[in-house]
Each structure stands twice: as structure tokens, then as C-alpha cells.
Amino acid sequence: MKRREVRALRARLLDELQHLDRTAPPDAMCAHLCDIVSAWLGRRILLRFDDLGPRGLTGLWAVTNEGTYLVIVTTVASWTQRVHILLHELSHMLCDHQPPEAESDLAQELFYPDISPSMLQLLAGRSPSPHRDELEAEHLAGVLLRTVLDWAREPAAPESPAGRADAATRVWFSMGGPSSRQAE
């Protein structure tokens, strides 16, 4: 993906994140990220968090015969790491990489915890050494993670106290006065 495309994607993501409450829990943010990419690609994306076992597999994606993307992210990581792993898998999609294909019955099994890590690794089409697609997805995921972290650090717009939308209140906030939430 070219730099210009990455910058445009970063700007689009930042714009889309404005629709999410900054106090939303991390799993809601992950679901929102999937919704954003789903809308961009015109494809359904199903997300699941699961313990992917001791083999070091942290995330995977596949596509069903119906064109639905399936993403599984490990639960054995911090939320920041999980968001990065999710963004890595979504980056494969955004870079138009070819996903492993999963049969419909098999795709449903992906969303049950009793599937073995070796089967997940097979489905993910993982190889022990990174190749061009992995490097490209990792680079884009890093850019998108920085975008999410920048968005999360932005101060929220001050809230007007309930029933106080008069001119004096607007002037107070425009001069940097704290909201009732900040004053507590």
C-alpha cells in the first residue's frame, strides 16, 4: 500500500472513530473497528476473542464461502495488544491480501472454543517466517494503532451542564472553564 493510501486510510479511520464514545470498553472499540472496516469493504466481519493455546498464535482471519470474514484474536494479551492484533488482521483485508478459505461448516466451528490450536494454525495458513503480506499488514496495523491511540488521547469536548446552555455558560467553556465532570 502506498504512503498516500495509508495517510488517506488513517484520516478516514480518525473520522470514523469520532462516532465512538472515548469511554467505551476495549471490546466495544474492537467491534467498532470491525464495523468500520466491514462498511469500507462491503463485507461482513465476525470477531471472536479466544485463548488460542500455547503455540504462540495470537490472531487469524479466514473467509467463508459466503464471503464473510472471520477474525479470532487471543485473550492471552493486554487490550492494547489485542487491538494491535485485530488491526493486523484487518490490515490484511485492507491490503487486499488473499485469506485462507474455510468451508461453511468449518467456519462455524471457528466460533466454538473446542477447536484445537493446530487446526487454527492450519486454517490461518501461517508460516513460521514472515513474508511480504505479513510485513505489509504489520506496517499498516502499526499506523492504524497509532491512529487509535492518538484518538484515545484527544480530550473529549467539554460537556455543558444540564439545563445551562445560556450565553454565559458558552463563554465559560470557550475560555477553557472546566465542565462539571472535570470539577468533581
Image: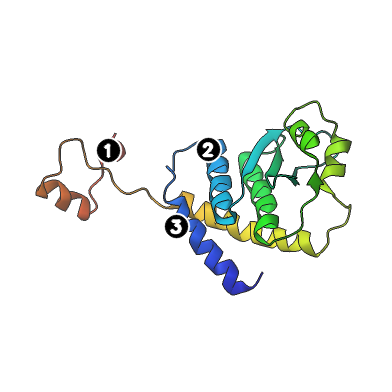
x then y, percent, for residue 124 = 81, 46
Residue 28 numbered tag: 2
Q: CA distance from mark 2 to mark 3?
A: 17 Å
User: Looking at this view, is 45 or 177 the one in front?
Assistant: 45
Disc 1 marks a residue whose amino acid type is: Ala
Q: Give amino acid for label 2.
A: Ala
Residue that badge 3 annotates: 15
Comes first in the chain, label 2 or label 3: 3
- Residue 164: give x, y in percent of width and height: 15, 40
- Among the 4 quarters of the image, the one containing residue 66: top right
Q: CA distance from mark 2 to mark 1?
A: 28 Å
Q: Which mark is residue 47?
A: none
Whole-percent x, y for residue 106 in the image: 80, 35
Which quadrant of the figure has residue 143? bottom right
Q: Residue at x 64, y 73 (%)?
A: 2
| Helix, strand or loop under label 3 | helix
Disc 1 from disc 3: Cα separation: 29 Å
**Dot 2 lies on which element?**
helix
Disc 2 vs disc 1: Cβ atoms closer than 8 Å? no
Vertical comparison of 170 with 107: above or below: below
157 to the left or right of 71: left
Quadrant (top left/top right/bottom left/bottom right) for the N terminus: bottom right
Q: Which mark is residue 183?
A: 1
Mark 2 closeness class: few <14, some 14–19, many ≥20 residues within 10 Å: few
In the rendered view, tell whether residue 110 sits above or below residue 171: above
Residue that protrudes farthest toward the top in the picture: 114
